[in-house]
Amino acid sequence: MIYKTLRKIPMITFIEIIHDMDITRLSDEETPIDELVSIWGMMYQEYQDKYNKQNSQKVFSLSKEIDFLEKKYVVIKCAVEALKFDVHNELIDILLDFGYSFSNENYNDDLLRVERECEGIIQKINQLKNSLPKEEKSNNDSAGTIINLMASYSSVMGYDFDFYTISVEKFYSLENQVKQKVAAIEKQNSKKK
């Protein structure tokens, strides 16, 4: 069997694939890896569109910015190191494109200044990383976290279900029901006060 939709794939399996990127979990039969990659790409995009709308755009934008800054930092550091040994106009042009300035009279001082200033990129990267959404637990315990969450949902709803077979769609449907029930209880409690 190959899981091809959020309606069929168990939530536990989906979360495990997200954390360990082992897309072979999508199928219990021999399936070409390129087919699994295609299926996973469609399912993950559908998941982002349906259930992770607020965070997905923010995370994607922040991740792109972090990735760009990390690469920019490496390029600048490597260029400065190379320029310490020999003058290369191409490397100087790269640094000029990044907004740094050089003069022939203060060449070595300018290199040291660029090296110091580029450390600010690391601070910016750390700020962006800190603004990414935090995960509740480590990636190693993702299955345990989702099972605990499902147990809580089961308790709130007042009925039991199989945590290992509940699909992604059904999980989020239950989550909406739990939110509605909790909101109703809170509303009822606020009237009693």
Image (cartoon, helix red, strand yellow):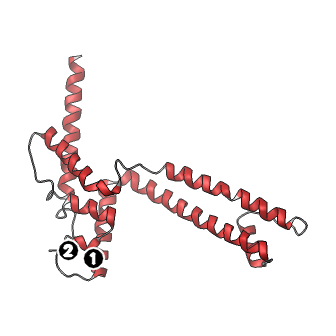
Q: In the rendered image, is residue 177 in sight?
A: yes
Residue that label 2 marks: 27
Image coordinates of residue 25 in percent, x first then y, are 23, 70
Outermost residue, right direction? 105
Q: Find out whether the residues at labels 1 and 2 contact each other: C-beta distance under 8 Å.
A: yes
Tell me the quarter of the image containing the C terminus: top left
Q: Give the residue drawn at x 83%, y 66%.
A: 108
- Would you say 80 lies left or right of 164 here? right
Tell me the quarter of the image containing the N terminus: bottom left
Q: In terms of depth relative to the viewer, which is nearer, 51 or 160?
A: 160
Q: Could you say which quadrant of the image residue 88 lies in?
A: bottom right
Q: Give the residue drawn at x 22%, y 71%.
A: 26
Q: What element carries label 1?
A: helix
- Would you say 106 lies left or right of 138 here? right
Check the image and report above or below for 142 versus 26. Answer: above
Image coordinates of residue 121 in percent, x first then y, are 63, 57
Please give the count of numbered marks on the rendered protein: 2
- Which one is earlier in the sequence, the residue at label 1 or at label 2? 2
Looking at numbered disc 1 in the image, what kind of residue is underneath it? Answer: Leu
Residue that label 1 marks: 36
Q: Could you say which quadrant of the image residue 52 lies in?
A: bottom left
